[in-house]
Amino acid sequence: MNKAITDGLELMPPAFATGLAVWSREDGTPGSATYADAPDAAFVPADQDFGGAIEIVKTEGIQRLRWTGETPILPGCYLRIRARVKALSGNMPSVRIAGWAGGAGGAAVTGVPLAGPSVALAAYGQVVEVSAIVGTGARTGVDLQWTPEVLYGHFGLDLTGPNGGAVRIDDIVIEDVTAVFHRKMMDWVDVKDYGAAGDGVTDDSAAFEAADAAANGRQVLVSEGIFLLADHVTFENAVRFEGRVTMPEDKRLILRQNFRLPTYIDAFGDEVLAFRKAFQALLNFSDHESLDLGGRRIELVAPIDMQAAVATEDIYEIRRVIRNGQFNCLPGAGWDTEVHASQASYSTADPLRLTAVANVANIPVGALVEGPGVGREVYVRSKDIAAGTIDLSQQLFGPAASQVYTFRRFKYALDFSGFSKLSKLTLTDIDFQCQGAASGILLAPDGNTFHVRDCHITKPRYRGITSIGIGCQDLQIDRCHFTSDEQQTPATERESIGFNVNANDAKIRDNRFQRLGTTMVLHGNGHLIVGNHWFQGDNVTDGPRVAGLVFTETNVKSVVTGNYIDNSFIEWTNEHDATPAMGAEFSFGGLTVTGNIFTVNDAAPWFSWFVVKPYGAGHFIQGLSVTGNTFKSLNGTTTRIERVDSSIAGLDFSRTRNVEFSGNTFNGIGQNTINPVTLEFNQSGAATNWVLDVSGYLPFGGWSREVTALVIEGPLRNGSGQTVFATPYVTTLDGAGNNLVRLTWPQALSGRVHVTARVDRPI
């Protein structure tokens, strides 16, 4: 690059033959004294070495010679000033290239070097060349590094040393030597050419901005060095890093043209820091909706506090995406679980709060709460140290008024709990390698539409995805793969949970969950559980199985359809209810289970795929559809597909309504469950009362509340064998268990009937 050629810059001073009025004996600024008619200087027209030359007798301590013309100083442009000098007589001085630095308004710029290397004249008549290079970049070979504030210079030379000697000076040359520093003509600009020091101490923010402004579509090069950026820096142009950048946590580096993690890694040299700064830019910068990790693997030795990375944002609700990379959690102390035990009080009058919490300051937000009367997946949502209180993610079903609770804070690869609200964030095509050391993702306490898709969460230590509040509202998990670190552990001893939900409207679709302790724990309602495969078996023969899908609200208004549910069961509870006994509320209902594959192998015969467990008295089923499913037991027979866990409380079968079990297939099942059930009954001996046992088919061991159809097949006969035309009346709720049906005829008869009985009533 040569600015004299490309931009037509006038760099060369005039020859001395044109006159000495443009050659100052001071600093070259307007009004300074010149050598025109000076008694100690004259033009020599025919020097044998130089041709035309100026002859000066040194009379001053520093004898200056400056061109009064203004030589422009441009970022990225390097100028060499050179002159040939010889001593004629008298004392021989030293000589150096020198200049005066001018800034805006003609003011002198201070703090920059004004003179190049000094050369001593050693012999009369010997021609010596002196030179110096001036430019804005801190490059090897630059003698006068001038800051971007310098706009122009007055250049020439200085004679130093003893006075009284005479010297002759050839015409001074100023030439563009930028090409010496640029290896070839390139479509980039270097930040060093715009004043960046790269020493790790000097603030290079302004130089970076200046280089970017000058690039005008070309690439910006951050060459070798450590560059401190003490302020925000935005690159409008593409940037390439050979050197490294360091910034305060609250300052942002914005890369408009190549906003990708690999570029940030090149910039900061550390994968974790680079990800933090890239995420900071993503949430503080509107030009990009997604951060591409570029397929890079980020090695983690501790959780990433995602809110701390952003620093300035506590609430964020604009769609953003992080995609295409891997987080690899290296085992170590950074993932150790924090465990605290504290006395606290609980009242159903304030069911989402613990009060009088001992050592509340030590209990971390996001900790799992454990203790008597505490249901599954109850977390510390927030705390008030001054008040000594903790806000909970769920209500407690039955703790003592005051008791000791255990708080366990798991460590997650990506921890979003520092946000007070975070919505519309998508993680896609990311592999979380938790290595049995870390858990996966911790959600913010509030927010909606958090979306995890096409991700792998492999070997989480305790949890795959955790919600500590309602940041799971409308949670979406699509086409993800959760793989347990406890695959060789018996099912009943596993601690891992795939994910939990506290709010409404989760969409869980087309995922695979492999041998976790529990696949999902869902509070709220409006959930769609579609097309997933979860399996939780073990290598224990005839062993017990545990719940895979747990609903913890009574009226769930949810759909479970098209799933493959393997060696685990659906458990339906109300354990997140501070007053679990039936009150002024909807009871268990609003659930559709359809088109699923249920299988189990090597399980105890009392295993069932659908278990209702009330945590308080008086509950009943008021809307349940189990249709079109396939149930299959391998290597052993399962007694029945459904049951009530009445270890705390049973169901009120007198209120059962709107229950359907139909269109299901049963293989290796001891007793089919059907409602309504149509059965054929044969009465061989004449009797007035026919007692029909429909109990085995009725769901959950419920009552025979309705007979909706009765068809007589063939003739009815009395004790004499005569055909009789008669109609019985029906008695439901018959027998000690209220689960038989009685037909009472006007006389003793025998025959065959088909009866349709129901465990429920429509209202």
Image (cartoon, rainbow, N blue to C red):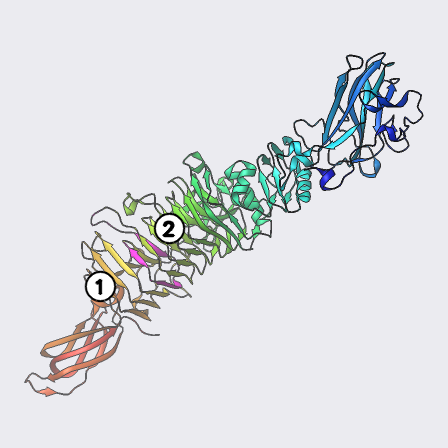
Q: Is residue 705 left or right of residue 553?
A: left
Q: Nearer the viewer, residue 123 or 730?
A: 123
Residue 408, relative to residue 35: is it above or below?
Answer: below
Where residue 540 sits in the image (x, y, percent)? 22, 46
Amino acid type for the residue under numbered disc 1: Phe
Separation (CA) of disc 2 from disc 1: 29 Å
Can residue 202 be seen in this snapshot? no
Q: Which residues are magenta?
A: 540-566
Amino acid type for the residue under numbered disc 2: His
Residue 392, relative to residue 77: is it above or below?
Answer: below
Q: Is residue 635 left or right of residue 94?
A: left
Q: Is residue 3 left or right of residue 676?
A: right
Name which residue lies at 66% across and 46% down. 216
The extreme left residue here reads: 720
The residue labelled by disc 2 is 481
Density class for disc 2 (Cα within 10 Å; few <14, some 14-19, many ≥20) is many
Density class for disc 1 (Cα within 10 Å; few <14, some 14-19, many ≥20) is some
Where residue 420 sits in the image (x, y, percent)? 54, 50
Quadrant, the N terminus:
top right
Q: State which mark lies toward you, 2 or 1.
A: 2
| Mark 1 secondary-structure assignment | strand
Q: Nearer the viewer, residue 383 or 412?
A: 412
The residue labelled by disc 1 is 666
Can residue 117 be seen in this snapshot? yes
Quadrant, the C terminus:
bottom left
Where residue 367 sits in the image (x, y, percent)? 45, 45
Where residue 395 sits in the image (x, y, percent)? 44, 54
Magenta stretch holds residue 415:
no
Whichever of callouts 2 and 1 sits on the residue coming sooner in the sequence is 2
- Quadrant of residue 670 within the rendered picture: bottom left
Confirm or deny contact between disc 2 and disc 1 (CB under 8 A).
no
| Mark 2 secondary-structure assignment | strand
